[in-house]
Amino acid sequence: MEFITQHPVLVVSLVKIAVLLFIVMTALAYLTWFERKVVARIQSRWGPYYVGAHGLLQPLADGLKFLFKEDMTPPTSDKFTYTIAPFLALALALTAIALIPFGPPSVQILGQPVFMISNLDIGLLFLFAITSIGVYGVALAGWSSNSKYPLLGGLRSSAQMISYEVSLTLSVVGVLLIAGTLNFNDIISGQSGYYLHFIPRWHVIPQLVGFLCYITAAIAETNRIPFDLPEAETELVAGFHTEYSSFKFAMFFMAEYANMITVSCLATILFFGGWLSPFPDSWTGQVFLPGAGLVLLGMYCAWDTIINMRGIAQLQFAVVTMLCLVGGSICLMPWVRPVIQGPFWFTTKVIAFLFFYVWTRGTLPRFRYDQLMDFGWKLLLPVSLANLVVTSFVLVVPYLRHG
Amino acid sequence: MSVPFLVFFACAFLSVLGAVLLLVSWEPIHSALSLILVMMSLAVLYLLLGAEFIAAVQIIVYAGAIMVLFVFVIMLLNAGNEERTDWSKIAKVVGLPMAFFLLLLIARGLSRSVIGATIANGVGARSNAGVSTRDLSTALFRQYLFPFEATSILILIALLGAWILARKDD
Amino acid sequence: MPILDHLWIIMALPLAGAALNGLLGKNWSKPVVNAIAIGSVSLSFLAVLELIREFAQLPAHQIPWGKDYFTWLTAGSFRIGFSLQVDQLTIVMLLVVTFVSTLVHIYSTGYMAHEDGYYRFFSYLNLFVFFMLTLVLAANLIVMFVGWEGVGLCSYLLIGFWFLKQSAISAGKKAFLTTRLGDTAFTIGILLAFWTFSSLNFGDMFKSIVQMPPDTMARAGTLTIIAVLLFIGAIGKSAQIPLYVWLPDAMEGPTPVSALIHAATMVTAGVYMVARMNPLFSRAPIAMLVVAMVGAATAFYAATIGLVQTDIKKVLAYSTVSQLGYMFLACGVGAYAAGIFHLMTHAFFKGLLFLAAGSVIHAMGGEQDMRNMGGLRKQIPITYWTMLIGTIAIAGIPGFSGFFSKDEILEAASSGPHRNVVLWLLGLVGAGLTSFYMFRLVFLTFFGKERFDHHKVHVHESPATMTIPLILLAVLALGGGWVAAPHLMGGTDHFEAFLHPVFAAYAPQEAGVEQGASLAAGAQATEEIESNSTMELVRAITGPPVMVAILGLFLAWWFYIRKPELPGKLATSLHGPYIALYNKYYVDEIYNALFVAPLLFISKYILWHVIDEGIIDGVVNGSASAARGAGGKLRQLQSGNARSYATWVVVGAVGFAVLLLALLSVSH
Amino acid sequence: MDPGEERRLSIIPISYYLVLSAILFGLGAVGVVFKRNIITILMSIELMLNAVNLAFVAFARAHGQIDGLVFVFFVIVVAAAEAAVGLAIVIMITKNRESLNIERINLLKF
């Protein structure tokens, strides 16, 4: 016990890491479910439906399947590299999340902020540092499987990631110029306040161009459709992870989704005011939103359970309903309300972004490789550069005027 | 033995290990990986020295860009194992002893010489906290503006040079 | 005070014009080139006007107003700043230069309209103006020297403007080399001056001159030497004996050039320099005497040659030489103001004369020989009238500008402090000759019967762009003298009073009176004139100068209107002198024999064949072959194996490290 | 970082860092001399640069001056440029000579 009081940093951090890891893993799993559902809806299908009510247990099933499959290693492959590649990918992807603040630093336990694992002065830089070496996972995987398609996939992905990383970074610099700091919390708190008392002062408004560049580059950075050349089925089977199977494959899979989450969080932080609420504080009603939302969801589930569900599914969904209602009522408790605000808005925004991701995947066709490169270097890069220049000029003008 | 010491020696060990691996591995990509290891541990050392920004830049530029470039080229050229030709005579006769001599010499000199001594006796101790990124940027854009611009020109030239060299000559 | 703080603007404008036209003008249409050239010069003229307005408000103690823009070169104590200064003298020069240049530019647009290399011409012209202004505005000898050489360069370029004409090229070369001769002495003078005064800023130099202990041998000696050396430079630049030979040939250049450079501005640079250095000269009596003698001699000598020249521009050229002689005479006898005054009036009427001559040539379609002209009076009235005014002015008929200035000079020579009868006589005769050959020119050109055939030559008056400048200059040639006139009517001489501070500032004590000599004279004049100023006026008007002028006019009329056959007779009867005069005393030939031929011989047989080919080339080739040999040996070291190179690098590094550590342990 | 931590950090003598950088530099030099693969040689050069950077940062820390860090920054930039051009050259060479072995590339003479 006194150990805890002696080393609050250590203990609290460990706890936080454990919790976050659990949450993120679950989120990853259910992100796949989410994606499949949404894409299915876009293609007017039902999507996973039978494993659990609304296919809610599908991710669990997939995970088990991956675990129990045979783990094959190509005999000609470079064993060491082949093995570390997926670990590298997943580890880096998860590390990035450790830097994200999900809520205001004011909420603390033992003098440690609850909603973020680390609060670096140069958080953004470090995030970029980590994402920048995320390439290795893919590249090494491609190279080490010592096979044609993976090599091509690896080459493509490393080229693509290098190319788009430039625009990604540049598109963010505009925000940095405005915020004047690299620390996430400062960036977020810099976005508090409102234009005309109701439009939130989010950087997306002055930095619209930057935001568009960012989101495009981000999609490319995470190798998602329409930029998923490294794993273009029609061209190179499955790209860099063709030779991978079982859990190694699953790691790449998770890494990709983790990266999605990371870039969505980053977009939220940089352009959409992180855990800040979109509504002015004067609208006191908003503190009830999280709870109310959950309760409503619960009611919907209840109705669904009673009307549509039959047999085991009905039972399962009843549990879901209970969870929603209980969670909602917890969120409505007076001492929970303020605490839950930040994470609520943050997750809402992130989910919106994820939905956007899935949406694009459901809608857009895939680029051709040369188109991809041209787009990256000849359109995205110049535009983000121009945005940077314009921003800096606008920022400098007042100094010029007042000497 | 305090935490920083542990960190330092761990990183030092890792970096030296990486360097040695870089030398002994016949597979270029393994050399690349070990070099990345060196860079990572150096980045940690920079953090230890309170140079956050440099650490980040070290990772981003070196590990994230330069080494990726190396790996990329290795993959592109599909560089296999290094051919084992016999050593160049000069290297055998001069290089090896010279290199180690140099190594020892510098190490000894540093530990004995004015620099090493004085700093070991705690000049380091009176050094201020790790410089903030803000100070660094101020120095870069005020005092060192001209070199900074010069480097940007240099980068541009390098870009063009690389393009000229690597394009398909038709 | 904008302009006063930014004197450089005045110079920068023409320079900008020159740069624009010279670099980009090739593809521009003539109007654009005109706009830039004339625009830049006239702008700087306006700038000068503004400058005068501001200068008028300057308190006396701030004059000369100096501006030091940047340090140009420093070596130990030796510092040359790019520094400009303005005082009354500068103002006068600036006014003359910018004004005349503007007119000449306008005139040139008409005169050069049909030439190719149009833009080139104007960019040279602008460049010249720039250098001339540099020369005038300079606050130290070096900057002045830059302008001095710059105008030389421009004159070279412009004389050789038609570089397809062999004669033009050689004329340009001649001008350049001859002036170089003077400039060499000038340079030495500058160095000596620095060695003596340890500064080249006019202000500091003059101060140290004043502080020099009077009447020591050192002072007299050095000052005299410096003055003489500088004056030799002036001789070259202002075409005095014996270096005048280049000026007549310079007439190969376009006429506007002759008007601007070889009449109005550049050639007067020497006079300006002497006037600028007046504290130096007035303390070097011998130098003064030299100046005066050279001036007077030139004035007379050039006039005699002018008598018989048949090329209209040659006549004007020689008259220019002789007028310059008058200016130096004035400076030589200590009447600097009079010299500058004559410089100004001369700029007006001689510029006018040249431009008018140009208009005549234009009208005659390129004909320059007066023997093939005559009777043009009716066809080209404007040219005729303006030229007549110019002639009267230069001849020194009372009421015209030339009269006042020349009269002052002669008066200074006769009654001034350094009075000297011989010089005065020379000047007087020169004046007579001047009026004679000038009227001869007019009569030959405009009177008598036409000696050309109408079918070949279609005579036509020049366009307005050429006539308007003529008229303007004519007005000035007519009235320009009156600024100094009142002195003759009793009352004080405004012009001289204006310039007085410049020449009085550092005037030597004993010469304090002499300095404002003619001013003082004017003062006395006023005193004694109180009673009978008209009497004084009459005495001035009926004085010897006027008499000889009238006489010259009359003789010219007698020879060329009354009895046109007379000159031929005279030429045959006085054959020897006539030929001598006609061939300009064979000076060119003599110079050729004396200097040019030996020089050629030396350069060819000694410098070229022996020194250049033998020694210099030998050294170069030798070292080259040595290097090749050494390389042949050394390249064995190059295995071509990059790693061995790397090894060598490392070895070097180790060596360096060893050295470093050794040093460290030593210092330890 | 809080001052207490600072103090403990600064106890590590700078000479440790310097010795480490010396060792790395020496190894890099060895690599340049010994390795045959051009790419590896370039990597060794990068290693040497890194060693130098470490020394710079250490000194900057020792004297509490920022210039060392600035210099490191420049070194990194230059290293990037060098890598880009160097690798381009490598690609060129392998195109022409079908070999990455530096001993096969011995045209670097008269």
Image: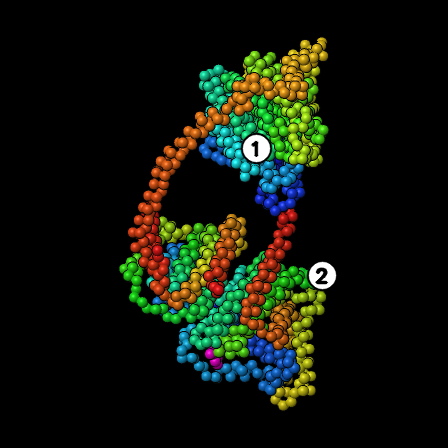
The picture places residue A384, in percent across and down from the top left corner, at 59, 61
Give the structural element (helix, strand or loop) at label 2.
loop
Q: Residue at x 51, y 31 (%)?
A: C174
Depth check: give the residue in front, A161 or C606.
Answer: C606
Between tags 1 and 2, which lies in front?
Answer: 1
Q: Main secondary structure of the magenta part?
A: helix
CA neighbours of label 1 inside 10 A, class few (<14), some (14 to 19), many (20+)? many
Magenta extent: A243-250
Name which residue type carries label 2.
Answer: His
Quadrant in the rendering for residue C367 = top right
Q: As displayed, is residue A383 above or below residue A20?
A: above
Q: In screen coordinates, is C303 left or right of A291?
A: left
Between the residue at mark 1 and the residue at mark 2, the CA separation in whole angstroms equals 84 Å
Q: As displayed, is residue B27 above or below residue B115?
A: below
The picture places residue C48, in percent across and down from the top left corner, at 65, 32
Q: How is the image coloured?
A: rainbow
Q: In screen coordinates, is A170 left or right of B105?
A: right
Chain ID at mark 1? C
Mark sitting on residue A197: 2
Q: Residue at x 64, y 21 (%)?
A: C564
Answer whether residue A245 is magenta in the image. Answer: yes
Mark sitting on residue C450: none
The picture places residue C86, in percent across and down from the top left corner, at 60, 29
Name which residue type carries label 1.
Answer: Glu
CA neighbours of label 2 inside 10 A, class few (<14), some (14 to 19), many (20+)? few
Depth check: give the residue in front, C534 or C117.
Answer: C117
Q: From the image, tell me which residue sits under label 1.
A: C252
Answer whether residue B162 is magenta in the image. Answer: no
Residue placed furthest toward the bottom? A311
Chain ID at mark 2? A
| Residue C124 makes an appearance in the image | yes
